[in-house]
Image (cartoon, coloured by chain):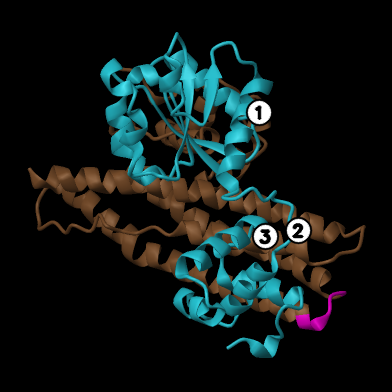
Amino acid sequence: MDSAMNTNPYLSPKMKMADAINQYHSLLTVLPRLGIPLGFGEKSIEQLCTEQHVSLPLFTLISRVYIQTDYYPSIEELRQCPMNDILQYLQQSHQDYLENKFPHIEQHFNALLEPMDKKYSTLIVNFYKEFKKEVVKHFQYEEKVVFPYMRQILSENETDNGEHHHKSAFQQQHDDIEDTLNDLTNLLLKYIPAEVSSSERVDMLLDMYALSNDIGKHAMMEDRILLPYIQYLESQSHD
Amino acid sequence: MIKIAIAEPSQMLRNGLADLLRDVPDTEVVFSTDNLNALFSRMPALHADILIINPLLFEYSHRATLRAEFDNHPELRLIALVTSYLESQHLRQFSGIIELNDDLQRVKSTINQVVNTLQSDGDEPDTDPLSDREKEVLICLSKGLKNNEIADTLNISVHTVITHRKNIVRKTGIKSVAALTVYAILNNLIEEKDII
């Protein structure tokens, strides 16, 4: 049987990791979450995955979500992946957003808001605070409800006993996070006057575009991997 | 982001087209398939804006009325991917046509034309600032009024309120009421004290 990677038109296991990243640099955020450190020299994707104990099908799955916007993995592909590792990855992503990505954007805030009319800067700060609160709440819901349920159903599937809960109706609302981030981006891009040399604003916008893209991929992973797989497992436990 | 779905039996064409579309800004291929069953089972969840479809996927007897198959998606625009001769009356059901020997430029302009019909419900170009009516709706929104309350206040129908709201979102690129409120204050449409 073809491994998932062989059918991937964009990456192959023999490809150098450095070449893959140079070509698809949004993958750069994926590596630390999988525990793959930089400085990997000429090693191939396959070599690095083996060395760092990362499942190759998992790496492939995540990379394809990043690279290929129309990618919907089949159940077969999902079954090759250690689902617990995917949960681990998603949780790492949350941590990365909260501990690195958001604080990074917040660092730009002070310099950005200082020259601004106090009336406006307060508005922006409050808007951002509300948004951040929603994000944290959403992540917590996933970590306290969705992921544990997923782990439970996975372990039940292995032992194949116990009663089954059917909660496939988890509603993922990452769209809201992306939308609000885009709203903020547009306010800063279009409507708040700035100095010509507002490099701080430009840096902040670049960070926000990158974060928005990454959160979009995160949402795709939940919509196209997690939910279909929960549904699949639930349908299995009917038999 | 304009969401595009592709339905085309040939894998080569499907992938090739998806590749070309990567160079068309603000578009995203959200789904591609070689058959109608997969397409129709996926359609409800896709929220695609544009479907590029080979009309040959439909049997001849259904081709003349194929647009009706998408009645559940009135906002969806169809683009025909034409790989062999098709009757012009069949092609009239499509908002645009892509032919096999179209180059990237041509494909881009076809998509852009269709995208433009998608973005402007009327004939207004996107660069217009908000109209007076839209500003009034925005002010009501910022004050926390609901659609029916806005309709009553401005003496217009709820449907018209919704149309204005769509136009506001399209022009500003801002979706949430919270951010629109910030926009209204920045543009001196309302005072901060007016917000509940």
Q: Picture quarter containing residue B111?
A: top right
User: Do the residues marked 3 and 1 share a common chain?
Assistant: yes
Q: Name the residue under label 1.
A: B109
| Element at label 3 | helix
Q: Residue furthest left?
A: A239
Residue A55 position within the rendered picture, expressed as x and y whole percent measured from the top left: 42, 35
Quadrant (top left/top right/bottom left/bottom right) for the C terminus of chain B: bottom right
Quadrant (top left/top right/bottom left/bottom right) for the N terminus of chain B: top right
| Element at label 2 | helix
Q: Which amino acid does label 3 sit on?
A: Thr
Chain A: give its colour: brown
Q: Name the residue under label 2.
A: A189
Q: Counting other residues with Cα less than 10 Å from the Cα at mark 1, is it few (<14), some (14-19), or many (20 or more)? A: few
The residue sitting at 28% across, 23% down in the picture is B62
Tell which tag, 3 or 2, sits nearer the viewer. Answer: 3
Residue B129 position within the rendered picture, expressed as x and y whole percent measured from the top left: 74, 60
The residue sitting at 64% across, 68% down in the picture is B134
Q: Counting other residues with Cα less than 10 Å from the Cα at mark 3, is it few (<14), some (14-19), or many (20 or more)? A: some
Gap between marks 3 and 2 measured at Cα: 11 Å
Q: Circle 3 marks a residue in which chain?
A: B
Q: What residue type is labelled 1?
A: Ser
Gap between marks 3 and 1 measured at Cα: 24 Å
A111, above or below B127, in the image: below
Residue B82 position within the rendered picture, expressed as x and y whole percent measured from the top left: 48, 16
Q: Name the residue under label 3.
A: B172
Q: Circle 2 marks a residue in which chain?
A: A
Which chain did the renderer colour cyan?
B
Residue interval drawn in magenta: A115-119
B76, above or below A98, in the image: above
Tell which tag, 1 or 2, sits nearer the viewer. Answer: 1
Q: What residue type is labelled 2?
A: Leu
